[in-house]
Image: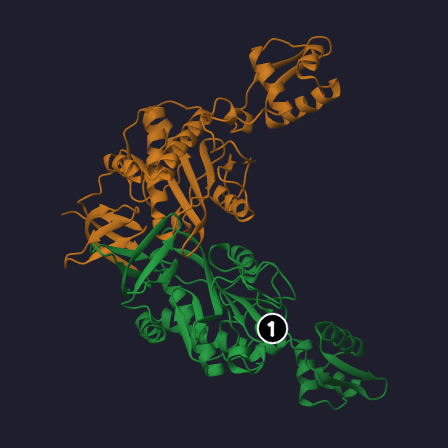
Chain colours: A green, B orange
Amino acid sequence: MIIKRPMNTKERLLQYLKEEEGRFVSGEKVSSRLAISRSAIWKHISRLKEEGYEIESFPRKGYALRSIPDYLLTAEIREGLKTSLIGQGPIAYFRKTDNTNNQAKVLAYDGTPEGTLVIAEEQSEGRGRRGRTWFSPPGQGIYATVVLRPLIPLNEAPKLTVLAAVATADALEGSTGLPVRIKWPNDILVRDRKMAGILTEIGTEMDLVDFAVIGMGLNVNIPELSFPDNLRTPATSILIESGQTFPRVRLLQSWLEALEKYYDLFRRGSFDVILSRWKLLTDILGKRIAVDLPGRQYAGEVQEVDENGVLILREPDGTFQRIFSGDITQLTS
Amino acid sequence: MIIKRPMNTKERLLQYLKEEEGRFVSGEKVSSRLAISRSAIWKHISRLKEEGYEIESFPRKGYALRSIPDYLLTAEIREGLKTSLIGQGPIAYFRKTDNTNNQAKVLAYDGTPEGTLVIAEEQSEGRGRRGRTWFSPPGQGIYATVVLRPLIPLNEAPKLTVLAAVATADALEGSTGLPVRIKWPNDILVRDRKMAGILTEIGTEMDLVDFAVIGMGLNVNIPELSFPDNLRTPATSILIESGQTFPRVRLLQSWLEALEKYYDLFRRGSFDVILSRWKLLTDILGKRIAVDLPGRQYAGEVQEVDENGVLILREPDGTFQRIFSGDITQLTS
């Protein structure tokens, strides 16, 4: 069951203007329908304009909505969002911030509820794993982070990476029809180029995860020539691969819905279902790889990803290594 | 080699007064020795008095140090502290705070350097694992947290708990001569009663620990009747077990020194040395125990604590479980 938060006045006003599909609505009508004063209407209209909505207003005719901005605005995200948890609580929206994971961690640390969403149109310090840069130009990508509070011991934390990767791949495939693959642990590739990345960070004691923030960077409408040349893995975008621009709000909604679907499975103890789906989306099993960890390298054959989401590597001498996360390179055999 | 931070003016003034062992020193002498003005002296004397130092001052005679307060003051902690990292950087001192781990996490998140120390005379929300309360009366215990930034992957994080337990046990045994034992993962017992507890918390990506805060609560001069009756494990204090009160500053210094010693071993890749010491301090190996994890229980025989600090439990059916941390109960066989 999906429990929807009631709309606030500004959202109800916007909803009304949308229903009128560009026709003028008089201040009087708005006032009686929403049961608010004329000055309150004026205040909310000003706010909406500040957010980028184009609204025409004429003294006798009233207000008409001319265009909806291509921003990831709260009201747009919530409209039609089919979740009951993720994206239904607090949403922190930034035109520009350092990065959404940092902001989400601050909120998580301050006790924000599970399901809180942080979004930015642009990141000045977009981050991937190990502090690497994530190219985050304004308005052409999705930079979003969700706060979760799963009741799991620390050694099950790698499950969250698997869950997030599957959700992201599913959402992307479902929305675009592109051939999406997961590169363990947290890259989403299309035709061997990186289209999205996931960054999971955790606050924890040893035996109990306090919070997890799951961040995603998704290259949506970024043209080929915009990418920096010096990327570790070649990048791509939905625009490049499909030849079309995609509405970011709908993509974000798909991601939130997929995350919720898999998080629900996870909470019901059905991690095996997620893992089965993951196995269909990855090519790593049975492959010979090298793994780079801080201060250590391993090489061997990927035996499995176990019931905790941990990658089990079989070294040439038969030793098994349990890898939570790391940089992998496929070795040619 | 121990690199000492130079003393600031206030600390140099205090040092001078201490050297004079209660004799009066004239303002003129202080002024010329420290090369500061009379009004600067007056300002620093006021600060020292605020901190609890009793300093007599007479117009013609000058200043004399009458007593050093029983507080864990920065100048007292640093005096003679034999470390080069831990306790030599920023020290955050609170007469009272929620708890030192929370304060340390805020600092760690803001980028405070490795070795930062947080101390409180009293905690309003002293915490143990899983949000349990740690009894933290003012002035009779040590409540301290150290920030570390080890470059290790997340699956090696349990090493830090082992390291902290060994350091705490060593410091306590060395300072008091009491028969100290470690109850895995993070309790320090004397004659089966809890004298100290350690709480390690981590901020991390999956493959790289960003920071660890290691907090300790130590019952120093707490009399038997002060403890609440409803404690999960019976508590004790150094006072109860030894019949003596102990100076807290010296105990804290021992703890910081022991932490640094074992952290150095850890950074040099000699975790095996720490683990050997740990094995001498614990009785858990080979014992039948039950482990309580969030939403799950295990029971079996303790096979070992492995090279990552993870407890390996052998269940009756021969399955092995890897336990990062948890509540254990010893089963009677």
Element under disc 1: loop
Q: What residue appears at the point 66 percent right and 83 percent down from the top-left corner? A: A15
Depth check: give the residue in front, A199 or A285: A285
Can you give x and y, in whole percent of width and height, for residue B54 in the image? 60, 19
Depth check: give the residue in front, B296 or B158: B158
Q: What residue appears at the point 67 percent right and 86 percent down from the top-left corner? A: A18
Q: Determine which quarter of the picture holds residue A332.
A: bottom left
Residue found at the far right of this picture: A59
Residue B130 in sight: yes
Quarter of the image where the N terminus of chain B is located = top left
Q: Is residue A119 above or below residue A242?
A: above
Can you give x and y, in whole percent of width and height, for residue A197 in the image? 48, 66
Q: Determine which quarter of the picture holds residue B257.
A: top left
Q: Is residue A204 above or below residue A213?
A: above
Can you give x and y, in whole percent of width and height, for residue A21 in the image? 69, 90
Amino acid type, label 1: Gln
B166 sits to left or right of B220: left
Can you give x and y, in whole percent of width and height, for residue B227 in the image? 39, 37
Residue B293 in sight: no
Neighbor class of circle 1 (other Cα within 10 Å; few <14, some 14-19, many 20+) is many
Q: The numbered mark 1 sits on a residue in which chain?
A: A
Q: Determine which quarter of the picture holds residue A282.
A: bottom left
Depth check: give the residue in front, B155 or A11: B155
The residue where tag 1 is placed is A140
Q: Is residue B18 above or below residue A56?
A: above
The count of marks equals 1
